[in-house]
Image (cartoon, rainbow, N blue to C red):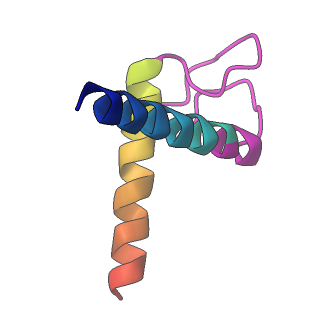
């Protein structure tokens, strides 16, 4: 049973990494957080993990609403 759980976790992590890479590839670096507008540095698209998570939640909700219409 543990092997199945380990494989499931690896599979989930792989898909999360792919999704994160895809998101980063589509969001241009602007020097500002894509969520709150604060200035970022070092090529970051979000000022912190909370802003990134908020942005992702809003985009998921936005996608869900677009698909329901």
Magenta region includes residue 27: yes
Magenta region includes residue 23: yes
- Dominant secondary structure of the residues highlighted in magenta in the image: loop
Rendered residue at 32%/36% (across/down): 4
Rendered residue at 59%/37% (across/down): 20
**Residue 56 at what x, y percent from top left?**
44, 43
**Residue 23 at what x, y percent from top left?**
63, 44
Rendered residue at 40%/64% (across/down): 62
Name the outermost residue toward the bottom.
69
Q: Would residue 37 be found to the left or right of residue 49 on screen?
A: right
> Can the viewer see residue 35 in this picture?
no
* Along the viewing direction, whichever of 60 and 16 lies nearer the viewer: 16
> Can the viewer see residue 32 in this picture?
yes
Image quarter for residue 49? Answer: top left
Name the outermost residue toward the left.
1
**Residue 35 at what x, y percent from top left?**
49, 36
Identify the magenta region: 22-48
* Along the viewing direction, whichever of 57 and 13 lies nearer the viewer: 13
Image quarter for residue 19? Answer: top right
**Residue 6 at what x, y percent from top left?**
36, 27
Question: In the rendered view, would you say 35 is above or below 31?
Answer: below
The quadrant of the rendering that contains the C terminus is bottom left
């Amino acid at each position: 049973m543990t092997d199945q759980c380990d494989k499931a976790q690896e599979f989930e992590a792989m898909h999360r990494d792919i999704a994160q890479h895809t998101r980063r590839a589509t969001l241009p670096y602007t020097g500002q957080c894509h969520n709150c507008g604060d200035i970022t540095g070092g090529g970051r698209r979000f000022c912190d993990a909370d802003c990134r998570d908020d942005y992702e939640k809003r985009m998921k909700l936005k996608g869900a609403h677009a698909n329901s219409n």
